[in-house]
């Protein structure tokens, strides 16, 4: 009986070793697959940047689309292709990718703020405002305050615009160029009510876009 138990335990141990060995091989294969996957995406991003740098916009967008096909929620590729499509005047395609980017942003604060800024760039004021508000609820970021300020400015809501633009540099992360630009936006936001009193009226969103 003791010999039988020893044989049974030995068999269990051998099976356990085989399973561990199989798991090790599977894990190694998974790691190799992941490395190839990441390397493939990195290569596509690099290729897209090269195409863009030499002025080959169509090729750059096609390469970025290939990266998106590999990983549909890749925010880096989505942001890059949106920027190129907007520049090329491909509004419908840019809007489709922007919707994907917005979904992919999830609860990541910086991505939600970027989505808000992209919506603002496309003059989608309500979506920009909603996303910037969501970002504010996730945590303070000066760029979200800037989006809120510019949306209010586009709607001629000057006191609210100044309120948010006052908070643009509270996190101290804006560079000199951004701080200077936002200072100009803030100054002009204060001046617009006076200009409107003089009879000047601009289309909704026009003055906010001109200050971006």
Image (tube, rainbow, N blue to C red):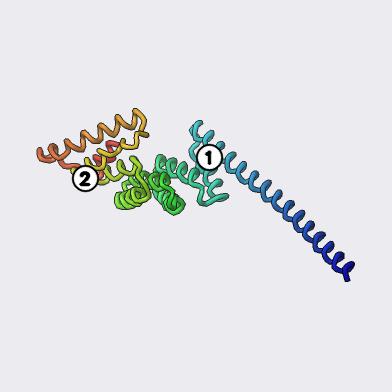
Whether residue 96 is visible to the viewer of this picture, yes or no, is no
- Which residue: 45% across, 44% down? 79
From the top left corner, tell me how far across and down residue 140 is, in percent.
Answer: 34, 44
Whether residue 16 is visible to the viewer of this picture, yes or no, is yes
Q: Which residue is mark 2?
A: 160
From the top left corner, tell me how far across and down residue 192 is, in percent.
Answer: 17, 38
**Closest to the observer: 9 or 67?**
9
Give the secondary structure at mark 2.
helix
Q: For residue 208, which numbered disc appears in the image?
A: none
Give the secondary structure at mark 1.
helix
- Quadrant occupied by the N terminus: bottom right
Number of numbered tags placed on the structure image: 2
**Closest to the observer: 148 or 92?**
148
Residue reaching furthest to the left: 198
- Which residue: 80% across, 63% down? 12
> Relative to 84, is 124 on the left or the right?
left
Residue reaching furthest to the bottom: 1
Q: Which residue is mark 1?
A: 59
Query: Which image quarter: residue 45?
Result: top right
Residue 100 to residue 165: above or below: below
**Closest to the observer: 167 or 10?**
10
Nearer to us: label 1 or label 2: 2
> Relative to 98, is 144 on the left or the right?
left
From the top left corner, tell me how far across and down residue 111 is, in percent.
Answer: 42, 46
> Relative to 50, is 141 on the left or the right?
left
- Please tell me which of labels 1 and 2 falls first in the chain: 1
Q: Residues within 10 Å of mark 1 (few under 14, many from 20)?
A: some
Q: In 3D space, how far apart are the residues under numbered discs 1 and 2 (Cα atoms)? A: 43 Å
From the top left corner, tell me how far across and down residue 15 is, in percent.
Answer: 80, 61
């Amino acid at each position: 009986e003791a010999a039988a138990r020893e044989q049974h335990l030995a068999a269990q141990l051998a099976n356990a070793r085989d399973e561990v060995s199989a798991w090790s091989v599977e894990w190694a294969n998974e790691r190799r697959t992941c490395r190839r996957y990441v390397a493939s995406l990195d290569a596509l991003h690099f290729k897209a940047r090269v195409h863009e740098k030499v002025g080959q916009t169509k090729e750059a967008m096609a390469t970025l689309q290939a990266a998106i096909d590999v990983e549909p929620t890749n925010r880096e590729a989505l942001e890059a292709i949106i920027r190129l499509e907007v520049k090329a005047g491909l509004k419908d395609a840019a809007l489709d990718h922007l919707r994907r980017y917005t979904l992919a942003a999830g609860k990541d604060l910086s991505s939600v703020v970027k989505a808000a800024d992209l919506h603002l760039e496309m003059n989608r004021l309500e979506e920009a405002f909603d996303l910037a508000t969501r970002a504010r609820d996730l945590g303070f970021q000066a760029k979200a305050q800037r989006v809120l300020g510019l949306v209010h400015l586009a709607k001629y809501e000057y006191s609210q615009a100044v309120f948010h633009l006052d908070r643009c540099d509270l996190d101290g992360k804006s560079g000199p160029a951004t701080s200077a630009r936002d200072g100009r936006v803030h100054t002009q936001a204060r001046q617009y009510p006076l200009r409107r009193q003089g009879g000047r009226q601009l289309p909704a969103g026009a003055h906010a876009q001109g200050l971006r």
